[in-house]
Amino acid sequence: VIIGIAIGAVMHGYVPEGFFEKYLSADNIWAVPASVILAVPLYSSASGVIPVIQVLVAKGIPLGTAIAFMMAVVGLSFPEAMLLKKVMSMKMILTFFGVVALCIIFSGYLFNIILV
């Protein structure tokens, strides 16, 4: 949680106002998949990523894109893949990540449509 607050503070204070809005706005059709891809290398709990989400929404990211980012941070991560590798084959892990990523992307688009 502390690291999430620190990242949120850095993003809030040092990232220009229109930076996230330019690349992850509602007008950009690739915003939701990009946010999911950006979230995969990160590893956090749901409570740890909330300060980051708060800053992203304050900077102009649509709520559906921010929710997709949050779900991907929690549901798709490299450390999770390493843990699953002990009990699943690589083909099964890739299938799992693909299905979860598609569901998260669909949810992000759905929230963006509903909440616009």
Image (spheres, rainbow, N blue to C red):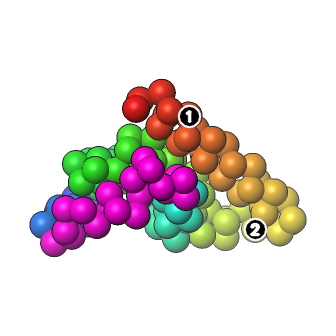
Which residue reaches farthest top? 114
Looking at the image, which residue is at 60% across and 45% down?
104
Amino acid on which the number 2 mark rests in the picture: Lys
Mark 2 = which residue? 85
Label whose residue precedes the other's in the sequence (1 or 2): 2
Looking at the image, which residue is at 50% across and 47% down?
68
Question: Where is residue 64 shown, x and y percent of the image?
Answer: 45, 41
As drawn, the label of residue 62 is none
> Which of label 1 and label 2 is nearer to you?
1
Tell me if mark 2 has few (under 14), some (14-19) or many (20+) residues whose alpha carbon lies within 10 angstroms of its own. Answer: some
Q: Camera-side residue: 69 or 114?
A: 114
Viewport quadrant of the C terminus: top left
Amino acid on which the number 1 mark rests in the picture: Leu
Instruction: Work out how far the residue at label 1 is from the one at label 2, CA to CA, in angstroms.
Output: 31 Å
Q: Is residue 112 above or below residue 55?
A: above
Which residue reaches farthest left? 13
Q: Is residue 46 above or below residue 107?
A: below
Tell me if mark 1 has few (under 14), some (14-19) or many (20+) residues whose alpha carbon lies within 10 angstroms of its own. Answer: few
Q: Would residue 14 be found to the left or right of residue 100 on screen?
A: left
Is 20 contained in the magenta span? Answer: yes
Question: Which segment did they paint magenta?
Answer: 14-32
Mark 1 = which residue? 110
Q: Is residue 70 above or below residue 113?
A: below
